[in-house]
């Protein structure tokens, strides 16, 4: 549906080209805030949501995943999720000559101790240098606790373009907006979005000249005076003046 088109990926693409995306409000509060955080944490060149796999996945299942996702290499984490402890990395080269396709990937992956990794907080230039010097195809970025926080791919770096017109805030992060309603529960939504770093909120209403929207806009500007607020829709001067 048209009113659910913009989430993190679309918002990132729009901000990189000089626009700004509005994360739709047809999501639970926590999920909408998470989409905002994905945009704010995005750094061109780093993959912040790579497809991860658990160590128990069979090689045959990995081949099916490759067919669906189109990727050849995958980080292996404790539970197969981003943010978990990195155990290793498996690439197509690791599986090409394995006869037993029922074997788990833990038996053929390159283990974490043998991987070239970068520490959390590494910048794009330094990470690029590590990839170039190591002659590796992928560079996991890990925290002090060895949890996977990002992945860099040589192939993505080669495709990565410079975006001189990107819409960024004072901290050099991409900008993003989010839609809200006018219900009392939307005040909790606004709080969560502000905590996630949202740059603007759009009051999503077919009638902007209503007491509900007036109260919502007034409350937002009282609580968060620096937050950009877009209200509407209105069609007359009087309605615009009321807002």
Image: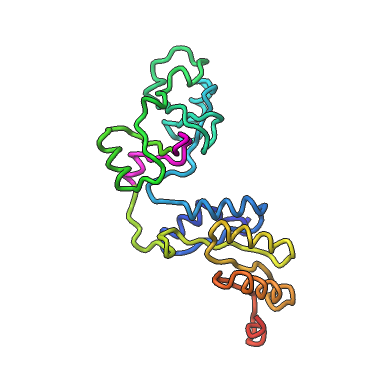
Horizontal and vertical percent for residue 120?
Answer: 41, 42
Q: Residue at x 50, y 32 (%)?
A: 85
**Residue 144 vs residue 167, the one in the foreground:** 144
Q: Is residue 147 magenta?
A: yes
Stretch in magenta: 143-159
Q: Quadrant of residue 217?
A: bottom right
Q: Quadrant of residue 136?
A: top left
Q: Is residue 66 magenta?
A: no
Horizontal and vertical percent for residue 201?
Answer: 59, 66
Is residue 115 depicted above or below 167 in this figure?
above
Left or right: residue 135 versus residue 152 is left
Is residue 163 depicted above or below 218 in this figure?
above
Horizontal and vertical percent for residue 127?
Answer: 32, 42
Is residue 22 depicted above or below 92 in this figure?
below
Q: How many marks?
A: 0
The extreme top residue here reads: 99
Q: Residue at x 47, y 31 (%)?
A: 86
Horizontal and vertical percent for residue 43?
Answer: 41, 51
Quarter the N terminus occupies: bottom right
């Amino acid at each position: 549906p048209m009113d659910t088109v913009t989430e993190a990926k679309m918002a990132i693409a729009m901000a990189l080209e000089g626009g700004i995306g509005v994360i739709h409000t047809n999501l639970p509060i926590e999920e909408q805030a998470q989409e905002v955080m994905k945009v704010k944490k995005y750094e061109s060149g780093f993959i912040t949501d790579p497809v991860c796999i658990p160590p128990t996945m069979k090689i045959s299942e990995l081949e099916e995943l490759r067919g669906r996702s189109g990727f050849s290499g995958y980080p292996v984490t404790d539970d197969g999720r981003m943010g978990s402890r990195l155990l290793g990395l498996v690439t197509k080269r690791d599986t090409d000559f394995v006869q037993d396709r029922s074997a788990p990937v833990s038996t053929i992956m390159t283990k974490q101790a043998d991987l070239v990794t970068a520490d959390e907080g590494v910048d794009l230039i330094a990470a690029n240098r590590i990839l170039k010097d190591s002659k590796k195809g992928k560079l996991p970025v890990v925290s002090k606790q060895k949890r996977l926080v990002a992945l860099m791919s040589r192939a993505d770096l080669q495709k990565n373009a410079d975006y001189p017109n990107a819409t960024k805030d004072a901290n050099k992060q991409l900008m993003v907006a989010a839609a809200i309603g006018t219900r009392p529960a939307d005040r909790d939504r606004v709080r969560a979005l502000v905590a996630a770093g949202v740059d603007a909120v759009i009051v999503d209403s077919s009638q902007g000249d209503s007491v509900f929207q007036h109260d919502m806009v007034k409350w937002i500007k009282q609580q968060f005076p620096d937050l950009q607020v877009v209200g509407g829709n209105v069609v007359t001067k009087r309605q615009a003046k009321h807002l």
